[in-house]
Image: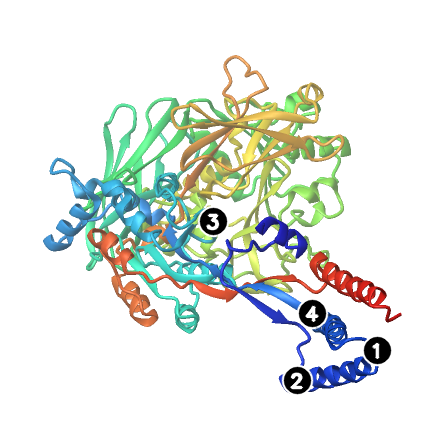
């Protein structure tokens, strides 16, 4: 019967007797007085009409009643009756679980306070055999939330939905679960967190969670963090935003507020290639955090393979800035590839000691460096430079003195009588040094100049020019060799001086010059400046228009200037694959006064060696592998470049070549591809984000090495930015301020379930009634038809028609 009634009423969403409460609503309802007046008027009109009809009173009253019913049905239809099921829609609230995934969450802590240590041990459910100091913050957190069958998480979602986010520099949504769902989903998501973020934006993370909630009801934000932020965002504005929306923030206190001592060694810097018997200086950067007063530590240099201690230096580190640089020195006695290690003993209370050591690879050579020295006339600079080369056992050299008599026997360990005429002859040398020579004087053809450009630009050879009063560098202007000079030649200068030079000067070293090994005049770096300050004055110098773009000024005149700034005196630069050098004076020989040849020889030998390319000495010269830097923050892509100097080898390559990234133990870490940068180009470039921190080498895997030659490679170091490691102690004060300002409460690991159970839901109920119109139903039509038919039938039967 009920189903028939629902069918007659055309009910689709409401079920009579099963849905409650139900009510009847008139969509176009009239006022009661109007309905009463209309009803009385209708009855009077119908009564008047039927009084005049013939027939008995019963018949007329019956027909009048039917007619009144018909009018009532029409009036009801006009008022549009509607059946209403009254109900409310409940919008659930949710809790945002915001977990710090920065690198600081992988730290271990020292807990001085016994009560705090006991609370954390109990909260994480550690057994008596487990050492609290060996547990990382993220591990303690995961165990605390998973303890007792995830009791804390079950309390969290007992009356609210839950959304889990992780954050470092940015916020990442991890999982969303409904109220009363399986808490194991949150446990699994938490166990998968890898704390490797390089930066922490605490305020930005809270703001992002509030913004992502939108119009949804946010019952609370559970913030799991050590309270440290590397970004300078305004935390007060975020606290105000949470307070205005009545969102309590509940910080979970993780980490120890006690400053943790830690020391870190690296990166190391040194020449990649030295000769046996030469001084090898390794510069080590030592950074310390958690110091409250200056501390002296011992930096030890060892042979990494044998463990033999080679050098020890004491260095004092101040709390601010917490960084010191120390130089350790040794003299390798034999050739080979060596790995050196610099280490510092752990500080008292230091937990993480794997970064107290760093390593660097150095190639020690016994091969001689081949030098070609071309000079115009036997000036003083010629005499002492030639003698310096002659005394250096690691160098072989040829000297071409252009103004010598035909019968003069040219000097050097490998005498020559003319400038090389073929690339094969020129490639016997590693460095070409030219003095005060005129390249236009006929001893050098234009094809030989082009050959010298290729020697530097493509073969990676070195080139140096020593200025002179007659020709250099002025006569190089407009020749192909002008490209090899790292300064702009001033066409208005000729070099000659019309008056005697009586006022001396001492070149001022630039910061780059002080860091350069060219001016390393003593094995002890602390005495180098002292020796330099004691050098005699120089007098003559060549005026130029300043350094070329990309060139590095190592020394400049103390008073003379040009249009671009101070007059450069010693300038280093690059041309293609090779290195170039320019010296604007020929008075270096004066440095021998009071010190003999030692300082002059040291300077010139360092100049020549600075021009040597590593890949030209006992290395495959067909191609080179480079990276745009030697140190990369973790997460930054390595940009590797492979340049080919051998046309035959280049022709064997396609448009891409395979590169490999190998770790310090020569184990494969990653593979990637380098693409040719343009049609016909000799260079290929590739990008790779390294998979982890550490020291790596980049090599071309698809090129077979040649016997007896080392495979070209580029060494890189991937390190985690120091922003996260600078302050590893937890900031409990910030966490407490966030809690108090937003109506939340800071919670320890052993209080999670208790505090989470007190979070009140913020459900919102909104009316969501279901309506079914009755005025257009089958029942209304049926009643109307039945009544009008009945009236017609009765009138017919009563003979009233």
Q: Badges 2 and 1: C-beta atoms under 8 Å apart?
A: no
**Which of the labelled discs sits on residue 36, or is there none?**
2
Q: Residues within 10 Å of mark 4 (few under 14, many from 20)?
A: some
Depth-wise, is mark 4 or mark 3 nearer the camera?
4
* Residue marked by disc 3: 173
Q: Badges 3 and 2: C-beta atoms under 8 Å apart?
A: no
Image coordinates of residue 784 in percent, x first then y, are: 75, 64
Q: Residues within 10 Å of mark 1 (few under 14, many from 20)?
A: few
Image coordinates of residue 485 in percent, x first then y, are: 64, 45
Alpha carbon of mark 2 to alpha carbon of mark 1: how far? 29 Å
Element marked by disc 4: loop
* Residue marked by disc 4: 80
**Which residue is painted at 35% across and 57% down in the image?**
223
**Which of the labelled discs sits on residue 328, or is there none?**
none
Q: In the rendered structure, which disc, 2 or 1, sits on the residue that comes first in sequence?
A: 2
Depth-wise, is mark 3 or mark 2 nearer the camera?
2
In front of the other: 208 or 676: 208
């Amino acid at each position: 019967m009920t189903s028939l009634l629902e069918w007659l009423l055309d009910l689709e969403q409401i079920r009579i007797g099963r849905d409650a409460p139900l009510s009847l609503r008139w969509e176009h309802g009239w006022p009661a007085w109007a309905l009463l007046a209309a009803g009385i008027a209708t009855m009077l009109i119908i009564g008047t009409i039927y009084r005049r009809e013939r027939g008995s009173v019963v018949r007329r009253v019956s027909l009048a009643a039917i007619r009144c019913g018909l009018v009532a049905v029409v009036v009801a239809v006009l008022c549009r009756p509607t059946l209403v099921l009254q109900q409310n829609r409940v919008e659930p609230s949710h809790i945002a679980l915001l977990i710090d995934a920065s690198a600081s969450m992988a730290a271990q802590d020292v807990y001085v306070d016994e009560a705090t240590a006991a609370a954390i041990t109990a909260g994480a459910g550690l057994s008596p055999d487990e050492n609290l100091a060996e547990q990382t913050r993220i591990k303690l957190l995961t165990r605390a939330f998973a303890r007792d069958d995830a009791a804390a998480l079950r309390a969290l979602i007992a009356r609210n939905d839950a959304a889990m986010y992780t954050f470092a520099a940015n916020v990442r949504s991890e999982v969303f679960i409904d109220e009363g769902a399986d808490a194991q989903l949150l446990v699994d998501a938490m166990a998968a967190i890898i704390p490797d973020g390089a930066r922490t934006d605490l305020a930005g993370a809270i703001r992002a969670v509030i913004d992502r909630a939108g119009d949804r009801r946010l019952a609370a934000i559970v913030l799991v963090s050590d309270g440290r932020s590397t970004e300078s965002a305004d935390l007060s504005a975020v606290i105000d935003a949470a307070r205005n929306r009545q969102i309590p923030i509940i910080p979970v206190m993780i980490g120890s507020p006690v400053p943790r001592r830690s020391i870190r060694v690296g990166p190391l810097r040194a020449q990649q290639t030295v000769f046996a018997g030469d001084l090898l200086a390794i510069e080590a950067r030592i950074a310390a955090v958690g110091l409250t007063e200056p501390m002296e530590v011992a930096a030890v240099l060892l042979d990494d393979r044998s463990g033999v201690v080679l050098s020890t230096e004491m260095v004092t580190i101040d709390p601010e800035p917490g960084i010191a640089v120390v130089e350790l020195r040794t003299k390798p006695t034999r050739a080979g590839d060596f790995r050196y290690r610099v280490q510092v003993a752990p500080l008292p209370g230091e937990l993480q000691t794997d970064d107290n050591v760093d390593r660097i690879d150095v190639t020690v050579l016994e091969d001689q460096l081949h030098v070609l020295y071309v000079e115009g006339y036997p000036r003083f600079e010629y005499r002492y430079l030639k003698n310096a080369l002659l005394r250096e056992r690691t160098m072989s050299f040829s000297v071409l003195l252009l103004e010598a008599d035909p019968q003069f026997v040219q000097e050097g360990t490998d005498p020559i009588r003319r400038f090389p005429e073929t690339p094969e002859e020129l490639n016997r040398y590693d460095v070409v040094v030219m003095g005060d020579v005129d390249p236009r004087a006929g001893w050098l053809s234009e094809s030989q100049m082009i050959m010298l450009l290729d020697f530097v630009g493509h073969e990676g050879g070195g080139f140096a020019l020593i200025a002179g009063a007659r020709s250099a560098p002025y006569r190089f202007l407009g020749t192909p060799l002008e490209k090899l000079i790292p300064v702009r030649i001033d066409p208005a200068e000729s070099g000659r001086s019309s008056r005697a030079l009586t006022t001396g000067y001492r070149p001022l070293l630039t910061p780059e010059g002080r860091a350069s090994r060219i001016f390393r005049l003593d094995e002890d770096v602390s005495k180098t400046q002292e020796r330099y300050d004691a050098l005699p004055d120089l007098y003559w110098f060549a005026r130029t228009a300043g350094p070329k773009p990309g060139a590095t000024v190592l020394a400049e005149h103390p008073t003379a200037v040009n249009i671009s700034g101070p007059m450069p005196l010693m300038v280093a630069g690059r041309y293609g694959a090779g290195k170039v050098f320019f010296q604007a004076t020929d008075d270096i020989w004066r440095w021998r006064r009071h010190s003999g040849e030692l300082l002059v020889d040291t300077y010139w030998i360092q100049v020549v060696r600075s021009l040597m390319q590593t890949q030209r000495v006992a290395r495959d010269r067909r191609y080179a592998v480079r990276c745009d830097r030697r140190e990369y923050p973790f997460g930054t892509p390595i940009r590797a470049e492979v340049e080919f100097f051998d046309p035959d080898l280049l022709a064997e390559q396609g448009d891409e070549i395979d590169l490999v990234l190998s770790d310090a133990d020569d184990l494969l870490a990653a593979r990637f591809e380098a693409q040719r940068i343009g049609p016909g180009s000799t260079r290929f470039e590739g990008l790779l984000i390294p998979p982890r921190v550490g020291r790596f080498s980049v090599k071309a895997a698809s090129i077979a090495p040649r016997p007896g030659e080392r495979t070209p490679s580029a060494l890189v170091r991937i390190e985690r930015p120091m922003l996260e490691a600078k302050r590893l102690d937890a900031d409990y004060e910030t966490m407490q301020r966030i809690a108090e300002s937003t109506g939340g409460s800071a919670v320890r690991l052993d209080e999670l379930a208790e505090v989470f159970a007190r979070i009140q839901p913020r459900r919102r109920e909104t009316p969501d009634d279901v309506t079914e119109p009755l005025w257009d139903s089958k029942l209304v039509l049926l009643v109307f038809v039945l009544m009008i038919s009945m009236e017609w039938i009765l009138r017919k039967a009563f003979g009233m028609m």
